[in-house]
């Protein structure tokens, strides 16, 4: 039985480019779909009265 040593450390650049392109397309699709959703803005004003005794004057 012979052992064959692979001396070339060649990576498949095409598959790497395809994976990166699919990731970028997926991110853009998610952003596009989230942009299409109309989130309602709050109508009611939030007003909270803060008493003056909580403020400290720093000189």
Image (cartoon, rainbow, N blue to C red):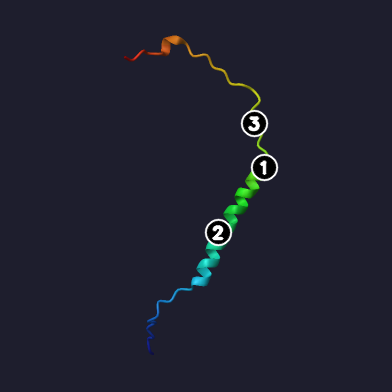
Residue 24 in the image: state x and y as whole percent: 56, 57
Q: Which mark is residue 16?
A: none
Residue beneath disc 1? 37
Q: Quadrant of residue 41?
A: top right
How far apart in space, not on screen, are marks 1 and 2 (Cα)?
22 Å
- Are the residues flagged by discs 3 and 1 in contact, CB closer than 8 Å? no
How packed mark 1 is, by other alpha carbons closer than 10 Å (few <14, some 14-19, many 20 or more), is few
- Residue found 61% across the figure and 21% down from its top: 45
- Are the residues flagged by discs 1 and 2 in contact, CB closer than 8 Å? no
Q: Is residue 16 left or right of residue 32?
A: left
Question: Which element carries disc 1, helix, strand or loop?
Answer: loop
Q: Is residue 4 left or right of residue 48?
A: left
Residue beneath disc 2? 23
Q: Is residue 59 left or right of residue 40?
A: left
How far apart in space, not on screen, are marks 2 and 3 (Cα)?
31 Å
Give the mark nearest the N terminus, 1 or 2: 2
- Are the residues flagged by discs 2 and 3 in contact, CB closer than 8 Å? no
- Looking at the rendered image, the quarter that the N terminus falls into is bottom left
Q: Which mark is residue 41?
A: 3
Numbered-mark total? 3
- Residue found 36% across the figure and 13% down from its top: 57
Q: Quadrant of residue 19?
A: bottom right
How far apart in space, not on screen, are marks 3 and 1 (Cα)?
12 Å
**Is 19 rendered above or below residue 7?**
above
**Is 31 rendered above or below residue 24?**
above
Question: Which element carries disc 2, helix, strand or loop?
Answer: helix
- Residue found 31% across the figure and 14% down from its top: 59
- Residue found 56% across the figure and 62% down from its top: 21
How packed mark 3 is, by other alpha carbons closer than 10 Å (few <14, some 14-19, many 20 or more), is few
How packed mark 2 is, by other alpha carbons closer than 10 Å (few <14, some 14-19, many 20 or more), is few
Q: Is residue 37 left or right of residue 48?
A: right
């Amino acid at each position: 039985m012979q052992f064959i040593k692979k001396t070339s450390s060649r990576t498949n650049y095409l598959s790497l480019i395809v994976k990166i392109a699919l990731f970028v397309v997926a991110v853009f699709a998610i952003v596009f779909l989230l942009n299409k959703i109309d989130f309602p803005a709050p109508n009611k004003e939030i007003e909270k009265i803060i008493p003056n005794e909580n403020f400290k004057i720093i000189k």
